[in-house]
Image: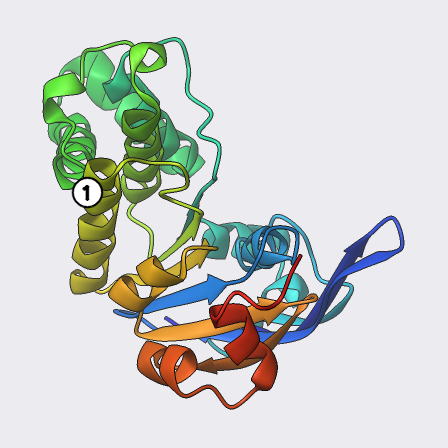
């Protein structure tokens, strides 16, 4: 399924944050948004994740404007999109429970009822399916050996990987990642990037917001350069970083633009 921001604008308290931004992500591709801090990358992800409605423009799931759908239908679309935030919010509980939580809150009421009945009467089909999804997510981020450890005792890199696993465990079709390896050491960064490649290989569409242009070169199918609240250029990473059309992109890549 295609998720699209079509000429969206959005601001807070009268201050423009995004202006006339268009971006789409297809199944099985990684789209990276690069730009300095404060330029609107997180706001764009939150619009794609339907946490906010745009002031102008449309967010579309296939050909449907998600904010024109009924509340129930929009909720169904939102369950297909999962976001991992830059600052992971973990609970004082084992890693496995933290990852399971994301999966549980995305269930519909009928799924929750079936899961409860399965637990009460010992019919393990639903529980086994849930455990399987959580285990697969933990395997993807290399944390199966930490599943019983309290999440608050993890390192920063491990905590970020738990947040990634929690997003994966909801079985999304689109995955939104906000600075997924910010301030991480090379080993944790490599694990995150491998997990992104794994998600793409399983047919997920992935949108990554990052200020790390080297990471964008490594992981992206397409790159959008977001400056001053608008995407000034987009295309394959080799074109954007090596032969950009916009002189502002060249200056940003060369470190000549100061923010």
Question: In the figure, residue 200 lies in which quadrant?
Answer: bottom left
* Classed neighbour count for the residue bearing mark 1: other residues with Cα under 10 Å, few (<14), some (14–19), many (≥20): some
Residue at 47%, 25% in the rendered image: 89
Figure label count: 1
The residue positioned 30% from the left and 74% from the top of the image is: 221
Above or below, 99 relative to 24:
above
Q: Position of residue 225 (x, y in %)?
A: 52, 71
Name the side, left or right, on which 101 lies relative to 24.
left
Task: Indicate the quadrant containing the C terminus: top left, top right, bottom left or bottom right.
Answer: bottom right
Q: Is residue 226 left or right of residue 138?
A: right
Image point (89%, 55%), residue name: 14
Side of 114 relative to 35 (left or right): left
39, 57: nearer the viewer: 39
Location of the N terminus by quadrant is: bottom left
Outermost residue, right direction?
Answer: 14
User: Is 86 situated left or right of 181 in this image?
Assistant: right
Q: Name the spot of residue 248 as percent of width and height, x first.
A: 60, 79
Q: Residue 215 in the image: state x and y as whole percent.
A: 32, 58
- Residue 24 position, x and y percent, is 47, 74
Is 170 placed above or below 36 here? above
Q: How is the image coloured?
A: rainbow
Instruction: Pick the residue in front: 118 or 207.
Output: 207
Q: Looking at the image, which residue is at 69% across and 66% down? A: 229
**Disc 1 designates what residue?**
191
Residue 4 visible in rendering: no
């Amino acid at each position: 399924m295609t998720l699209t921001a079509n000429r969206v604008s959005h601001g807070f308290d009268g201050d423009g944050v995004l202006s006339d931004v268009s971006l789409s992500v297809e199944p099985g591709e990684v789209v990276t948004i690069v730009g300095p801090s404060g330029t609107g990358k997180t706001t764009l992800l939150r619009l794609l994740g339907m946490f906010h409605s745009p002031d102008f423009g449309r967010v579309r799931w296939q050909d449907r404007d998600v904010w024109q759908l009924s509340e129930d239908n929009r909720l169904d679309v939102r369950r297909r999109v999962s976001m991992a935030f830059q600052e992971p919010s973990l609970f004082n509980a084992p890693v496995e429970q933290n990852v399971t939580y994301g999966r549980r809150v995305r269930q519909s009421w009928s799924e929750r009822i079936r899961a409860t009945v399965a637990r009460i009467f010992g019919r393990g089909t639903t529980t086994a399916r849930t455990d399987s999804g959580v285990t697969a997510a933990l395997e993807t981020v290399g944390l199966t050996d930490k599943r019983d450890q309290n999440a608050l005792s993890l390192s920063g890199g491990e905590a970020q990987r738990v947040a990634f696993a929690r997003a994966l465990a909801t079985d999304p079709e689109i995955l939104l990642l906000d600075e997924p390896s910010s301030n991480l050491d090379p080993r944790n960064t490599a694990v995150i990037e491998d997990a992104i490649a794994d998600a793409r290989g399983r047919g997920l569409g992935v949108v990554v917001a990052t200020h790390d242009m080297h990471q964008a070169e490594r992981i992206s199918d397409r790159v959008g350069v977001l400056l001053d609240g608008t995407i000034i250029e987009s295309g394959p990473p080799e074109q954007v970083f090596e032969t950009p059309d916009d002189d502002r992109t060249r200056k940003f890549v060369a470190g000549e633009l100061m923010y």
